């Protein structure tokens, strides 16, 4: 993780988002910081007036009141500036977070399926929550306050040199000690803060996985193992967070006490120089006196305090940059390859052809070997075989969720790699074994397949696949709001709505991946009649373990270890008494 590069990129993004307001806010921060250094100058002048004046207090008080009035005016301006800084800072911070969330979500929609298959969903969510929150703290608090502290330090250093070089050298000696301590302790805590962000993502990924699989955990009585897995990750996060915060919390008191010691040393040094009558060396030419030593003590305290602020905010910036790096990693992830330029029009038919296709999810393991098949409109092609044979992989290749390693897939005679993915996918209707319903009404979930579909078209789609009857029995019928992925419905009901959603899309090609696996036999018979009507005139691929659902297929492909080992109609395959015969009759399990 390149922290420096992430910081430069973040600053560039901030100025891109707010090219006017951000510079104005920075100017106001600098202005307020500069005013905070003014008291030392005014104190010196007031003490000098009292120390050197031979006049009565009434005469001196006029000048003192004048100086105090000017100082008060500066503080009023500082107050107004601070209010503006707070208002602009809030607007900029929330705007930046909104922009980054928008960038992440937009990019997420353009990422390939492979990204979500290889990255835990909880870890991705952690970037929207923990990493964005660490960015918020850095932008809203750490960076402005660190900038204020840095400007104050440089301004005070200039005033110190104006007053006395000798006392400045004493102060800088203490600052060197503070810098060494900060580097030693702060460097270690920065490493731990970065590790804390990583383990936070891992813990959230594990928690999300256990939450989704809670029923499985309980069915197999794996609560103890689940707790142990959580405790292991939680302990790792605790260890890194504890070390990071211990070191960060230790640094503050150490630096504070070094500042106190420095205050005492500076006071002693000033007193010794005054008593010894030493010649003062300064940019102002002022002699060493009480009027120099007293404001210098105030500056020493202020200088050390701001060095401490710089050190403390450094940890928040490291934590924020660690989160920013993870945000940038998502934004920079390789998008889905959509190099195709051709589109499909309304005249397309929907024929699909695989020509000697080879594919593997990784380079080391090939899943499909020399797959050749042809499916025409009005033809129902079934893919059967044992688990892991490659059936679902074929279904993933047709919509280009993954691209083939060898061979080609043709749509109406043209290579699908030459088509834009949106054009291709609009022609496809896919029903997966794992259904996904969104928060909204039943009608809205069905319309998700075709946003331009009228209410009646959505109802007809539900009626076609046999979902209308149970939908009308819901409390609000089609207006019933579904939440939690349709948790208030049975798995079979959720699947029926998913099938109705595909029907509403009115696609040329239908891909049904175990679409009726969660439906009981009676309901399946009703759905099958609707499905047959839905499939009429379309190119259909059916993946099923329940072989009774594929008997009426025009072509059945039997797969094993990524190869098509048998093909034909139900009657032809039963006559051959090969693998399909064994699967259908149950002889496969007995052999």
Image (spheres, rainbow, N blue to C red):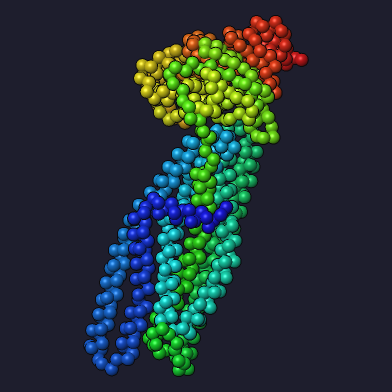
Please indicate whether residue 354 sits to the left or right of residue 534 in the image: right
Q: Which of 36/407 is in front? A: 407
**Residue 270: horizontal and vertical position, in percent?**
46, 86
Position in image of residue 386 (x %, y %): 67, 20
Q: Is residue 496 visible?
A: no
Which percent across, then down, holds residue 131? 50, 48
* Image position of 146 (left or right of 187): left
Residue at left offset 67%, top offset 35% = 363
> Is 338 above or below relative to 10?
above
Q: How many marks?
A: 0
The residue positioned 43% from the left and 18% from the top of the image is 346
Q: Which quadrant of the figure has residue 58? A: bottom left
556 lies left or right of 84? right
Q: Residue at x 25, y 80 (%)?
A: 65
Q: Which quarter of the image is occupied by the C terminus?
A: top right
Above-or-below relation of 162 to 427: below
Up the image or down, 106 lies above or below 189; here it is above
Q: Position of residue 308 (x, y in %)?
A: 49, 68
Q: Quadrant of residue 585?
A: top right
Instruction: Report whether residue 335 is seen.
Output: yes
* Residue for point 58% across, 19% down: 353
Residue furthest to the right: 591
Viewer-side residue, 569 vs 314: 569
Q: Is residue 294 above or below residue 215?
A: below
């Amino acid at each position: 993780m390149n922290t420096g590069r992430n910081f430069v990129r973040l600053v560039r993004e901030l100025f891109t988002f707010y090219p006017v307001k951000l510079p104005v806010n920075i100017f106001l921060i600098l202005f307020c910081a500069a005013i905070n250094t003014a008291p030392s100058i005014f104190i010196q002048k007031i003490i000098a007036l009292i120390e050197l004046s031979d006049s009565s207090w009434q005469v001196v008080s006029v000048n003192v009141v004048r100086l105090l009035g000017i100082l008060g005016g500066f503080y009023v301006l500082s107050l107004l500036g601070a209010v503006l800084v707070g208002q602009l800072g809030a607007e900029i911070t929330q705007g930046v977070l909104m922009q980054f969330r928008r960038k992440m979500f937009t990019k997420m929609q353009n990422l390939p399926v492979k990204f979500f298959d290889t990255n835990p969903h909880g870890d991705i969510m952690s970037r929207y929550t923990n990493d964005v929150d660490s960015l918020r703290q850095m932008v809203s608090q750490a960076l402005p306050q660190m900038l204020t502290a840095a400007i104050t330090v440089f301004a005070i250093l200039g005033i110190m040199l104006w007053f006395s070089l000798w006392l400045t050298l004493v102060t800088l000696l203490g600052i060197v000690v503070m810098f060494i301590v900060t580097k030693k302790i702060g460097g270690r805590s920065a490493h731990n803060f970065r590790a804390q962000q990583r383990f936070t993502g891992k813990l959230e990924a594990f928690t999300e996985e256990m939450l989704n699989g809670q029923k499985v955990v309980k069915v197999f009585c794996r609560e103890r193992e689940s707790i142990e897995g959580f405790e292991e990750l939680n302990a790792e996060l605790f260890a890194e967070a504890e070390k990071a915060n211990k070191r960060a919390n230790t640094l503050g008191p150490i630096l504070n006490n070094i500042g106190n010691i420095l205050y005492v040393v500076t006071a002693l040094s000033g007193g010794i120089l005054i008593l010894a009558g030493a010649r003062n060396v300064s940019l102002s030419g002022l002699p060493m006196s009480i009027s120099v030593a007293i404001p210098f003590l105030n500056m020493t305290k202020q200088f050390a305090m701001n060095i401490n602020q710089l050190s403390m905010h450094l940890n928040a910036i490291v934590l924020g940059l660690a989160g920013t790096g993870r945000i940038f990693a998502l934004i920079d992830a390789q998008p889905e390859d959509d190099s195709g330029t051709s589109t499909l029009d309304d005249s397309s038919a929907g024929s699909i052809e695989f020509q000697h296709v080879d594919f593997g999810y990784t380079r080391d393991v090939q899943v499909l070997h020399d797959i050749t098949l042809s499916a025409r409109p009005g033809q129902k092609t079934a893919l059967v075989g044992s688990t892991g044979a490659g059936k679902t992989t074929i279904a993933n290749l047709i919509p280009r969720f993954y691209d083939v390693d060898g061979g080609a897939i043709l749509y109406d005679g043209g290579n699908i790699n030459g088509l834009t993915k949106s054009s291709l996918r609009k022609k496809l209707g896919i029903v997966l074994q794992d259904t996904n319903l969104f928060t909204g009404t039943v009608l809205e979930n069905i319309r998700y397949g075709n946003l331009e579909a009228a209410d009646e078209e959505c109802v007809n789609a539900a009626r076609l696949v046999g979902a209308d009857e149970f939908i009308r029995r819901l409390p609000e019928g089609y207006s019933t709001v579904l939440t939690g992925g349709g948790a208030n419905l049975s798995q079979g009901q959720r699947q029926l709505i998913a099938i109705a959603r595909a029907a509403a899309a009115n696609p040329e090609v239908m891909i049904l991946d175990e679409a009726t696996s969660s439906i009981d036999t009676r309901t399946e018979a009703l759905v099958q009649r609707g499905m047959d009507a839905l499939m009429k005139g379309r190119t259909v691929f059916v993946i099923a373990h329940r072989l009774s659902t594929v008997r009426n297929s025009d072509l059945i492909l039997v797969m094993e270890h990524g190869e098509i080992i048998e093909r034909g109609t139900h009657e032809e395959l039963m006559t051959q008494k090969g693998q399909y015969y064994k699967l259908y009759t149950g002889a496969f399990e007995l052999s």
